[in-house]
Every structure is written in structure tokens, then in C-alpha cells.
Image: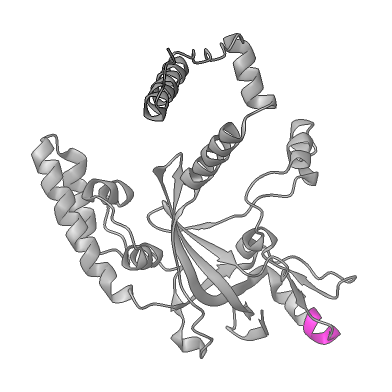
Amino acid sequence: MKMITSKPATNSILLATVAALGISLLSGCGQESVPAPKVDARTEKQKKADAIYNPTPEQKAQQAAERQARIDADLPRRIDFSDPGSAEDSKYLDIGETFVAYKVYNAKKAWDETPEDIAKSTLILQATNGVDPRISAIGNKLWHARDAFEKSDLQKEQAAIVTEISQPYHETQLVKVSLPSNVAGLESYDFNQKGFPVAEVLFTDKLSFTETDSKNQQYGNSKSVKPVKAYLSNTPSDYKIGFTGAADKTLIKVEDEQLARKIEAARQHADVVFYGYIESVQRRRLAGNDQKERFVMIHMQKIEIKDAKTNEVLISTSI
């Protein structure tokens, strides 16, 4: 007897076999083991060394961000102003007069300062020419106050007065400073350069000692140490005046011998007048914290040498 097998039956068996094989394969894939993560066998000391000498791209990026954050934390608070151009001498405010730099700073700064902070920088106990008498009166009360609420009220009162007396200086742009020749750094005539060196320390942009300066200072070679930038202190002493834009303009050229003789003869009792515009007001910061020093920075435009006895302008030179 012949057994007859139909094609449909054969197909069914084949499909069942394929399906079973597929299930078996899928089941096998699901059972594959995941590789275990590599164990970092380095010691903590090795990890720290690698982070310094062989950092990963991620560590490099993090280190760069941290360096920039430290730099930014030491940058001063600052607001800059544009050049208004020059004007006739009578338009320049004498910022060297008592309390003027203080009022200019408080009028033009673009950040808030607390009443307590303002009071600490404004401690004036005696009546002073050029200073609003209310300032010294409150200063005396603050000096003797022991009650915390009384102090707070006095500080707020003083801050309101500071805002009031500073407001008229908000639009101040052009300023001048008159200094005695010895303070201005007016040196004797230089025959090689044919001129008078002036304000080399006030005008320099050098803000810290170089490595060479530090070594010279260490070994007692003080004459070889070129000083860092100097600022003029005003009343109150936390408010400084500085100069910019003239680091390479510290020689007043005078080739006329007769004029040079006249200036040299008057030099000991001469005044040097610096004219310029307010380039910025700044407040020093360190590690992200406000420091007490505030600055009004003047961009130089012109220098005059005047005979203080006769008030005669001996020479005027643009920068």
C-alpha cells in the first residue's frame, strides 16, 4: 500500500520547524551575557596624577572652565563710557577736589551696593570742606551706635543722602586733576630725549611685579624694580583716581632750549594738570567678593605744566 503525503501537510511541518527554530534563536539571543564593565585598577594617587598630566577630554574641558571661573572671579565690577571728545578747559570738572571722585563713582556705577557697604566706605567723623555736613553728622552717630537697628537706620539714611548728592554727577564726562610737580612725577630735563619725563608711575599699565622685579626686590636691587601702576587717593581713601591711554606718553617733548630752561627753572614749584574723560568706573573683586577699593579711570587727552607762582601755562601738549 502506498502512503500518499499531501503537500499541505508537508508545508505545515516545514513552517512549524522554522517557527520553532526562530523561537530557539531568539531565546538564545536573549540569553547572551553582557560584558562586565572594566574595573579602574588605578589608585587615587594615580587618578590625580592622570588628571593633571594625562587628562581626558572631559577633564580638560572642566579644568579650562574652572580656570576661567577663577579669572572671572577676580575681574572688577566695571562700566565703560565712550569718548565724548575734547572741549575748552572750563568744561572740565576738577575730580581731584575733595569728595568729587566719590560722588562721580556713586553716580555712574551700574551695580547695587548695600547701605552698610556704602557706610563703611564713607566713614567721615569731622566736618570737612567739600563734604556734605550730614555725612559727618551721621558718621559720628554710627561710630557711637551700639543698637543694631539704630545702625541699620543710620546706614539707610546715609545711603539716601549719598544718592542725593551724587545724582548731579551722573552725566559728568570731562575731568581734570592738578598735581604738584613732585606728586605728578615731573622729572628734570632729559637732554638725550629732549623733553621732560612725567607721570611714569601714574601712566603705566603695569599692574603687578614681574618675575625680574621680584628677584631684584629680594636681593635688594630696589632701584631696578619698576613700580606698578599708582593711583591717587581722594576723600574717602577707598576711592581712587587712575589714568589710562598714556603708558607710552610719559615724555613732554621740548626742543626749544629757551622754553626748556624756563620750565626747568619753574619745575620745583610747578603744577601739572591732567585733562581727560571718564573711561570707566570700577570696583575691585577678589575670588568673587567685592573689595573696598573703587576706581574712577581717566583716559588722558592733554597735559599742562603751569607755573604755580604766576599761574602761567608754560606748555600744553595733547596726548
Residue 112 visible (yes or no)? yes
Which quadrant holds residue 178? bottom right
Residue sitting at the far front: 1
Q: Residue at x 80, y 38 (%)?
A: 221
Left or right of 216 in this view: 304: left
Q: Quadrant of residue 111?
A: bottom left
Q: Residue furthest bottom?
A: 88
Label tally: 0
Indicate yes or no whether the magenta region holds residue 219: no
Residue 257 location (% of width, % of height)? 85, 84
From which residue to which does the magenta span run? Answer: 256-260
Residue 123 in sight:
no
User: Could you tell me which residue is drawn at 21 percent across and 68 percent down?
Assistant: 164
Is 257 within the magenta? Answer: yes
| Residue 294: image location, x then y, percent | 42, 55
The quadrant in which the N terminus is found is top left
Q: Quadrant of the C terminus?
A: bottom right
Query: In the figure, is residue 16 to the left or right of 37?
Result: left
Q: Position of residue 297 (x, y in %)?
A: 51, 65
Secondary structure of the magenta portion, mostly?
A: helix
Residue lying at the far right of the rendered structure: 192
Q: Residue at x 11, y 48 (%)?
A: 153
Q: Is residue 169 above or below residue 312?
A: above
- Is residue 85 left or right of 16 when viewed as pictured? right
Q: How is the image coloured?
A: one colour
Q: Quick one: 33 or 21, which is closer to the camera? A: 21
Q: Residue at x 23, y 54 (%)?
A: 136
* Rendered location of residue 213, percent (x, y): 75, 41
The foreground one among 212 and 309 is: 212
Residue 66, compared with residue 135, is above or below; it is above
Q: Quadrant of residue 246?
A: bottom right
